[in-house]
Image (cartoon, helix red, strand yellow):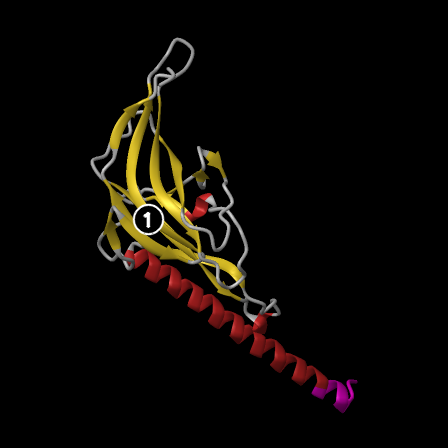
Amino acid sequence: MESLDEVIDAMIADRVIHRHRRVWLLVIALLIAAILVILATGGWKEKKGRTVPTLDAPATVTAGRFEYTFTKAEIVRKPKTEYSKAEASLKVYFTAKNIDSEEQKSDSITGELLRLVPGGGADLVESNGDSCKGDNLNWVLVYGLPPEDCSTKFDVGPNFNADVVEIGVLQEHYEGDNSALGADPKPYWHNEDPAAVVRLKPTVVIDDGKAK
């Protein structure tokens, strides 16, 4: 037969379990609500319900630890040859400046921070990151220096064509994780979310592989 202390301990344990269960159920409910809101607004895939500004190039966007000025875009076509299939890519030009006043560290622009917004409900397309100083990929931008001339590329289909393209710019936030869940509260750059969409009118460039 259980003693009174054992019964009390069991009751306390049961209450703790139910309390934590209620907390987790609340967290799950909030996550589901957030997902439903995102689905309802359409994020930035559709103009209707878009919650970030849409700018026409040339346009300057301050997003997290970087500042961009978008200038032009090109649809670069590589014709079919005897040895290769036809290819195309979208190349977007911009200047970029490191404005990380929090950590004052040098870093490059990752592909997930610049994305092509195809529209029509299609998935966003990540870029290949920044290319600066003569197409040097993943160029490190030094804090405090003037803006660098850069570009980024997006893989598109060989028949891709558009009068206007939209580029989604994501911003990181300098903040810590939720210490209530046992995470490290020390702030760092993460938690990317949309900052703006920039519209550009691309020109078509033929890359036949010949030296210019």
Residue 164 lies, in percent from the top left, at 22, 39
Q: Is residue 165 magenta?
A: no
Say if residue 123 shows up in the picture.
no
Bounds of the magenta span? 1-8
**Amino acid type shown at disc 1:** Thr
Query: Visible in this render: residue 56?
Result: yes
Where does residue 92 sit, x and y in percent of width and height?
Answer: 34, 38
Identify the residue shown where x is 29% and y is 45%: 121
What residue did someone put label 1 on?
A: 69
Above or below, 108 against 74 in this view is below
Q: Main secondary structure of the magenta part?
A: helix
Does 125 sit above or below residue 207? Answer: below
- Residue shown at 39% from the left, 8% from the top: 82
The N terminus, quarter of image: bottom right
Left or right of 40: which side holds 25?
right
Query: Can you name the residue that lies furthest to the top here?
Result: 82
Label 1: state its secondary structure: strand
